[in-house]
């Protein structure tokens, strides 16, 4: 018996059907939108991270500069066991390296003044400040190292100060300043053992136009320091493009500030015309990021640098901040205080 089956088109199961062209194009479009969104998110996150890194480095450099300079100012005028009584403070050349030019003279009973402010004109004339940034001031600080060493250890070519504590030492010799260990002959309090010595420190803080000069143009706080028979320059903090100083003058002799000036008054014979009467320094740092931020504008902001006035507004896409630190010069102000 013959059975006739119905003939018709076979249809594929729904699970085996592919995408239509329209569906495929829609899927690709959605995928591209998602990829573009992720790429944008990544780019924004990367840019935000970069800007955050710039700001963090700027803040760190500014705070470091303020802390470092503040600490050095606080010990200015520290000359160890040498009594300031009868010692006349004189202003020595800022770049002096020879012992005879540092202001120390036992016969005349003179020693270098602790703090000397340098105007932009004075700083520009110094040969020991390479790559000096035009228009910025500088600060000279002098003191001795707080660590004493035996005279035989003073062999690194540095300048050292030795003070007499013995009543039988020659009355005319209160101190000796030299680079040679054999010159130190003054005794300690027992009048038997040769007294210790302390390294003399003379430093100039200034702003340079570059950090690694020849490779960048980042304004940098630098320090020229007396080492041996030369002034050696070291970079300290990047992005410091200007420093301004307000000097606290004690004109009444009680150790307290009576006036703040941006420099000497210029009045002959006046107490505020003598660097020896500076008992404190207020320092203003203008710091900027080391790299510009695309599209950034400071909105016409001006930056206050105390008695030196304001700076800005700037239009160069760098972010800026001002830091201020006020430091008392203990070794000058302290002995003047009235009990």
Image: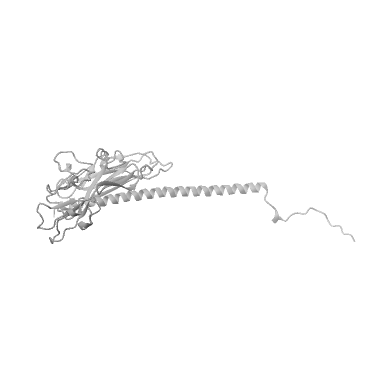
Tell how many labels.
Answer: 0
Residue placed most toward the observer, 216 or 307: 216
The answer to whether residue 128 is above or below residue 157 is above
> Which residue in the rendered view is the most extreme toward the right?
1
Residue occupying the point 31% across, 49% down: 65
Visible residue check, residue 337: no
Q: Position of residue 141 (x, y in %)?
A: 23, 48
Q: Quadrant of residue 194?
A: bottom left
Q: Position of residue 317 (x, y in %)?
A: 40, 41
Which corner quadrant holds the C terminus? bottom left
Q: Position of residue 81 (x, y in %)?
A: 16, 55
Residue placed most toward the observer, 54 or 220: 220
Which corner quadrant holds the N terminus? bottom right
Which colour style is shown? Answer: one colour
Visible residue check, residue 20: yes
Residue occupying the point 58% across, 47% down: 32
Residue occupying the point 54% across, 47% down: 36
Q: Position of residue 149 (x, y in %)?
A: 22, 57
Taking the image as shown, residue 203 lies to the left or right of residue 288, namely: left
Residue occupying the point 47% across, 47% down: 44
């Amino acid at each position: 018996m013959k059975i006739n089956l119905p003939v018709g088109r076979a249809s594929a199961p729904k699970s085996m059907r592919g995408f239509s062209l329209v569906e495929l194009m829609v899927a690709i479009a959605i995928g591209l939108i998602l990829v573009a969104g992720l790429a944008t998110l990544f780019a924004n996150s990367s840019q935000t991270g970069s800007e955050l890194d710039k700001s963090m480095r700027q803040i760190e450099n500014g705070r470091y500069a303020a802390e470092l300079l503040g600490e050095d100012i606080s010990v200015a005028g520290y000359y160890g066991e040498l009594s300031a009584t009868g010692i006349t403070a004189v202003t020595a050349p800022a770049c002096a390296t020879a012992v005879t030019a540092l202001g120390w003279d036992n016969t005349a009973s003179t020693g270098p003044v602790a703090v000397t402010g340098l105007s932009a004109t004075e700083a520009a004339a110094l040969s020991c400040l390479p790559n000096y940034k035009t228009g910025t001031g500088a600060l000279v600080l002098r003191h001795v190292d707080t660590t004493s060493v035996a005279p035989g250890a003073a062999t690194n070519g540095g300048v050292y100060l030795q003070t007499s504590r013995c009543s039988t030492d020659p009355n005319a010799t209160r101190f000796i300043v030299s680079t040679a260990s054999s010159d130190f002959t003054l005794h300690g309090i027992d009048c038997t053992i040769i007294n210790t010595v302390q390294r003399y420190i003379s430093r100039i803080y200034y702003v340079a136009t570059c950090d690694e000069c020849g490779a960048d143009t980042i304004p940098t706080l630098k320090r020229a320091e007396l080492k041996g028979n030369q002034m050696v320059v070291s970079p300290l903090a990047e992005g410091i493009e200007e420093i301004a100083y307000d000097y606290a003058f004690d004109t009444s002799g009680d150790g307290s500030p009576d006036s703040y000036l941006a420099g000497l008054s210029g009045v002959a014979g006046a107490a505020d015309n003598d660097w020896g009467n500076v008992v404190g320094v207020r320092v203003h740092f203008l710091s900027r990021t080391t790299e510009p931020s695309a599209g950034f504008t400071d909105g016409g902001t001006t930056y206050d640098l105390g008695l030196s006035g304001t700076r800005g507004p700037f239009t160069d896409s760098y972010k800026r901040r001002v830091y201020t630190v006020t430091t008392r010069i203990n070794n000058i102000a302290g002995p003047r205080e009235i009990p």
